[in-house]
C-alpha cells in the first residue's frame, strides 16, 4: 500500500469532513456578523434536517424529499429566529445567547423524545453512494462531491453578498445595526434572509454528512456544531472565507491526528486547544474585522 | 398586562417543579396492584437513551415479558404484587449514579440490569452501599461483580468470551488482527484486551486502535488499517457505532474478516449495514433457532406472541426485519433470566429485604432458564459455558455455530 495513496486517502477524508464543517460554520459566522449572536442551536438544526429526511423519505421517496427537507430546515431556522431571538433583540447579548443554548437543548431533547433515543438509518441517495477505483484506492463519489459543492455554494454566496442589493443590505447591517435601520433598511428582512441562507446551508450539509455516515441520532449535531463554531472563530467570526478556511484546516488536521495511533485520542482536544490559542493570541481570528476604537 | 403574564409564567414553572417532586418521581412503573395489596418493587436499571438504548430496550422487553408471566410472588403466605420501577442510565457512566439513586430512593428490593458494563460498574457501588442486590443481565466485564458482593450476573464474562472469539479468529485464519476499542468504555476496552491476550498467547499478533465516544468518522482508521494490511478486525463497540465501522470499512476498501461480541446481536445493525455486513461474525448468549434448548423454544414462542400483540413493543424490539419477522436479540433472554433469578430469590428469601434477597441469590439454583441452568459462583457470576456464534446475511442475523464447554 503506497504511502502516497494513504496520504491522499487521509487528505481527502480531511477535506470532506472540513467542507461539512464549513457549511455549518458559515451559518454561525453570518448570524454573528449581523446579530452579534452565537447561534448554538445551529448544530441541532443540522441534526433536525437529518431527521426530516429520514421521516419524509420513508413516505415520499428520496427525490421529492430533498427539496422538501431544505424548505423545512429553512422554515425551522426562521421559526427559531422569530420565536427565540427576535423578542430579545433589545435585551443584553447574554440573554440571547442563553436563549440559543436553550433552543439547542430543546431541539436535542425533542428529537430524543420523538425518536426514542435510537439512531435512525439515513436513506441512500443513489448517485452519492457509488464509489470508483482510482489506481489502488477506492474513492467514494461523496468524497469528491462534498468539497466541490461546498466551494460552489461559498462562491455563490460571496457573489450574492457582493453584487446584490440584499447582500449590500446585509453588509450594512453587519457594519452598523442602528445606522442601517436609520437609513431605511428593513432589518427584519435582512435578518430573515441571513437565517434562511444559514439554515439552507446547514440542510445541504446535513444531506451530505448523513449520506456519508448513514445514520442520524439526536445528539449528533452537538460535536460538528461545536467544531464548526471553532472554525468560525478561528477564521474570524463575521468573515465567511475565514470560516471556510478554518473549517478545512480543522478537518484536515483532525484527519491526520486520527491517523497516528499515539495521539489519535486527542483529535477533539486539538480542535478545542486551537480555539483557546486563537482566543489568546488573535481573538479576532485570522481574517476577523479589526475593531477600531472611536474616540 | 406584562406583569400578569410574568406572574402566571412563574406560577406555571413552580407547578411543573412541584409536579416533578411528588408522586412516583420520574420512574415509570408497571400498573401497581390496587391499594391495600402488598407490593414488592424490582428496579429496572437500563439505558433507554444514548448509544446503548437499542440493547437496553430489548432487555426491558425480556424483563416485562417475564413480569407478565410472573406478576406476583408469595411471601409468608401473602400474595405480593411485583412492581417494576424503571430508571434510564442514558448509556452514560455520569448519569448512571443518578439512575441508581432514583431506584434506591424508590425502595426497590432488588435491581435487574444493566446493559453496558460501564454503567453497571458506576451504579454498582451505590447498590452495594444501600444493600440492594443487583442482577446484571448482559454486562460482561468481570469488574462488575469482582469486589461487589451485591452484584450478580446471569451471563458469561469477557475473559471467556474473548478466548472464544480469539479461537474463532484463529480458526478463520486471522494471524494479524487489529482491535478497535472505544476509549474509556469498560466493556470495549476490557473485552478487546481479553481478545488481544488470547491472540497473543497463540502466537498471533494483535494491535489496538482507540476512538472516542460519539465518533462517527472512521475513514482515517480504515485508511490506516488498509495501509498496514491487517487480516482481521475485532470491534467490541456499541450498537450505534457498529454499522459505521462496518460500512466505512467496506467502503474504504478494507476486505478482511470483521468480528465482534455480544453487543452486535441487534437487528438494527443488520438493517443499517445491509450487504456490507455479510460474513461478519459475533458471539452472543442465545439463539432462537436452537432446537436443543427446550426452555428457549418455549420462551421464543411465548415472547413472539407477546411482542406482536403491541406495536409499541415491536418498535422497541427494533421493528420487523426483511422477512417480516420480529427478531429476538440475545440480550432479551438475559433480561428474562435476570427477572426470573430475582423472582426465585425473593421466593427463596421469603422477604422483601435487600440483604436477605442477596443471601438467597448467593446460593440460588434455578433450572431450565432460557440461557440454561443458573448457578452463581463465588464472585456472583453465572456458571455458563455456552456461546452462540452468529453472522449477518442480507439484512438479517443467522445462527452459525455454537461453542460449549
Image: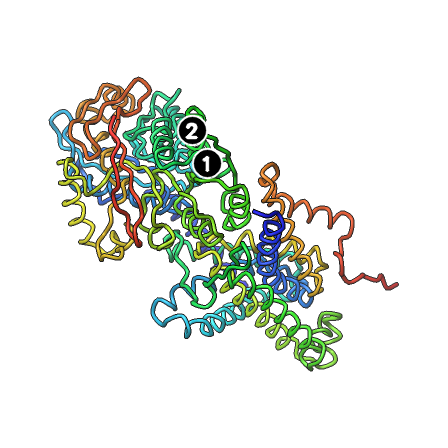
> In the rendered image, which quarter is residue B102 located in?
top left
Judged from this view, the residue extending furthest toward the right is A295
Q: How is the image coloured?
A: rainbow
Labels 2 and 1 in the same subunit: yes
> In the rendered image, which quarter is residue B271 located in?
bottom left
Q: Is residue B400 left or right of residue A134?
A: left
Where residue B37 appears, as percent x and y from the top left, is 17, 36
Which residue is pictured at 58% across the width and 58% down the height?
A: A16
Label whose residue precedes the other's in the sequence (2 or 1): 1
Q: Relative to residue B79, is residue A72 depicted above or below?
A: below
Point out the image quarter for the C terminus of chain B: top left
Q: Relative to residue A220, is residue B104 depicted above or below?
A: above
Mark 2 in CB contact with mark 1 (< 8 angstroms): yes
> In the rendered image, which quarter is residue B347 located in?
top left
Question: Could you say which is closer to the camera, residue A151 or residue B275?
Answer: B275
Q: Answer whether residue A103 is visible to the viewer in this image.
A: no
Where residue A67 appears, as percent x and y from the top left, is 47, 74
> Which type of secondary structure does the marked residue at label 2 adopt?
helix
Mark drawn on residue B199: 2
Question: Could you say which is closer to the camera, residue B131 or residue A49?
Answer: A49
> Which type of secondary structure does the marked residue at label 1 adopt?
strand
Q: Residues within 10 Å of mark 2 (few under 14, many from 20)?
A: many
Q: Relative to residue B125, is residue A195 depicted above or below?
A: below
Where residue B334 appears, as percent x and y from the top left, is 26, 36
Q: CA distance from mark 2 to mark 1?
A: 8 Å
Where residue A160 appears, as percent x and y from the top left, is 66, 77
Q: Label 1: which residue?
A: B177
Question: Could you say which is closer to the camera, residue B332 or residue B15?
Answer: B332
Amino acid at each position: 500500500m503506497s504511502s502516497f495513496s494513504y496520504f491522499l486517502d487521509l487528505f481527502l477524508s480531511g477535506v470532506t469532513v472540513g467542507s461539512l464543517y464549513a457549511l455549518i460554520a458559515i451559518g454561525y459566522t453570518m448570524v454573528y456578523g449581523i446579530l452579534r449572536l452565537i447561534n448554538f442551536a445551529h448544530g441541532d438544526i443540522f441534526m433536525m434536517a437529518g431527521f426530516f429526511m429520514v421521516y419524509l423519505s420513508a413516505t415520499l421517496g428520496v427525490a421529492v424529499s430533498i427539496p422538501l427537507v431544505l424548505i423545512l430546515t429553512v422554515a425551522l431556522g426562521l421559526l427559531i429566529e422569530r420565536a427565540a431571538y427576535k423578542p430579545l433583540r433589545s435585551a443584553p447579548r447574554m440573554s440571547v445567547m442563553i436563549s440559543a443554548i436553550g433552543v439547542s437543548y430543546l431541539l436535542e431533547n425533542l428529537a430524543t423524545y420523538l425518536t426514542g433515543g435510537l439512531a435512525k438509518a439515513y436513506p441512500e441517495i443513489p448517485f452519492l453512494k457509488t464509489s470508483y477505483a482510482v489506481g489502488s484506492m477506492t474513492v467514494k463519489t461523496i468524497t469528491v462531491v462534498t468539497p466541490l459543492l461546498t466551494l460552489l455554494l461559498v462562491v455563490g454566496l460571496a457573489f450574492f453578498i457582493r453584487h446584490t442589493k440584499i447582500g449590500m443590505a446585509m453588509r450594512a447591517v453587519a457594519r452598523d445595526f442602528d445606522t442601517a435601520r436609520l437609513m431605511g433598511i428593513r432589518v427584519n428582512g435582512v435578518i430573515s434572509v441571513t437565517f434562511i441562507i444559514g439554515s439552507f446551508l446547514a440542510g445541504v450539509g446535513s444531506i451530505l454528512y448523513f449520506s456519508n455516515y448513514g445514520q442520524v441520532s439526536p445528539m449528533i449535531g452537538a460535536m460538528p456544531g461545536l467544531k464548526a463554531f471553532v472554525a468560525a472563530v478561528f477564521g474570524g467570526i463575521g468573515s465567511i472565507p475565514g470560516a471556510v478556511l478554518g473549517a478545512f484546516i480543522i478537518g484536515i488536521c483532525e484527519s491526520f491526528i486520527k491517523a497516528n495511533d499515539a495521539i489519535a485520542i486527542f483529535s477533539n482536544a486539538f480542535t478545542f486547544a486551537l480555539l483557546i490559542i486563537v482566543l489568546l493570541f488573535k481573538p479576532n481570528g485570522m481574517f476577523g474585522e479589526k475593531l477600531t476604537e472611536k474616540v | 398586562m406584562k406583569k400578569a403574564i410574568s406572574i402566571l409564567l412563574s406560577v406555571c414553572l413552580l407547578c411543573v417543579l412541584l409536579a416533578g417532586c411528588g408522586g412516583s418521581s420520574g420512574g415509570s412503573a408497571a400498573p401497581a396492584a390496587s391499594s391495600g395489596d402488598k407490593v414488592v418493587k424490582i428496579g429496572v436499571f437500563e439505558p433507554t437513551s444514548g448509544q446503548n438504548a437499542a440493547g437496553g430496550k430489548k432487555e426491558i422487553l425480556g424483563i416485562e415479558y417475564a413480569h407478565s408471566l410472573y406478576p406476583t410472588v408469595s411471601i409468608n403466605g401473602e400474595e405480593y404484587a411485583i412492581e417494576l420501577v424503571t430508571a434510564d442510565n442514558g448509556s452514560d457512566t455520569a448519569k448512571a449514579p443518578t439512575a441508581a439513586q432514583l431506584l434506591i430512593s424508590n425502595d426497590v428490593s432488588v435491581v435487574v440490569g444493566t446493559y453496558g458494563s460501564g454503567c453497571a460498574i458506576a451504579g454498582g457501588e451505590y447498590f452495594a452501599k444501600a444493600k440492594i442486590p443487583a442482577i446484571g443481565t448482559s454486562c460482561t466485564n468481570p469488574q462488575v461483580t469482582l469486589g461487589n458482593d451485591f452484584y450478580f450476573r446471569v451471563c458469561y464474562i469477557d475473559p471467556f468470551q474473548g478466548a472464544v472469539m480469539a479461537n474463532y479468529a484463529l480458526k478463520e485464519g486471522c494471524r494479524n488482527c487489529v482491535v478497535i476499542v472505544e476509549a474509556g468504555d469498560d466493556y470495549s476496552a476490557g473485552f478487546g484486551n481479553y481478545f488481544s491476550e488470547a491472540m497473543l498467547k497463540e502466537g498471533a499478533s494483535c494491535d489496538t486502535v482507540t476512538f472516542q465516544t460519539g465518533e462517527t468518522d472512521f475513514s482515517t482508521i480504515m485508511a490506516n488499517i488498509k495501509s498496514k494490511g491487517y487480516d482481521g478486525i475485532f470491534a467490541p463497540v456499541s450498537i450505534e457505532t457498529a454499522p459505521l465501522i462496518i460500512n466505512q470499512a467496506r467502503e474504504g476498501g478494507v476486505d478482511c474478516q470483521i468480528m465482534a461480541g455480544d453487543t452486535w446481536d441487534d437487528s438494527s445493525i443488520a438493517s443499517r449495514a445491509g450487504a456490507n455486513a455479510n460474513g461478519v461474525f459475533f458471539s452472543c448468549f442465545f439463539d432462537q433457532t436452537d432446537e436443543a434448548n427446550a426452555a428457549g423454544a418455549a420462551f421464543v414462542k411465548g415472547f413472539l406472541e407477546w411482542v406482536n400483540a403491541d406495536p409499541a413493543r415491536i418498535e422497541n424490539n427494533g421493528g420487523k426485519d426483511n422477512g417480516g419477522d420480529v427478531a429476538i436479540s440475545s440480550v432479551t433472554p438475559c433480561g428474562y433470566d435476570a427477572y426470573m433469578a430475582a423472582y426465585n430469590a425473593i421466593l427463596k428469601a421469603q422477604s422483601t429485604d435487600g440483604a436477605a434477597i442477596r443471601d438467597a441469590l448467593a446460593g440460588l439454583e434455578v433450572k431450565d432458564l432460557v440461557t440454561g441452568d443458573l448457578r452463581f459462583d463465588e464472585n456472583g457470576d453465572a456458571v455458563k459455558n455456552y456461546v452462540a456464534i452468529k453472522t449477518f446475511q442480507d439484512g438479517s442475523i443467522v445462527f452459525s455455530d455454537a461453542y460449549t464447554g
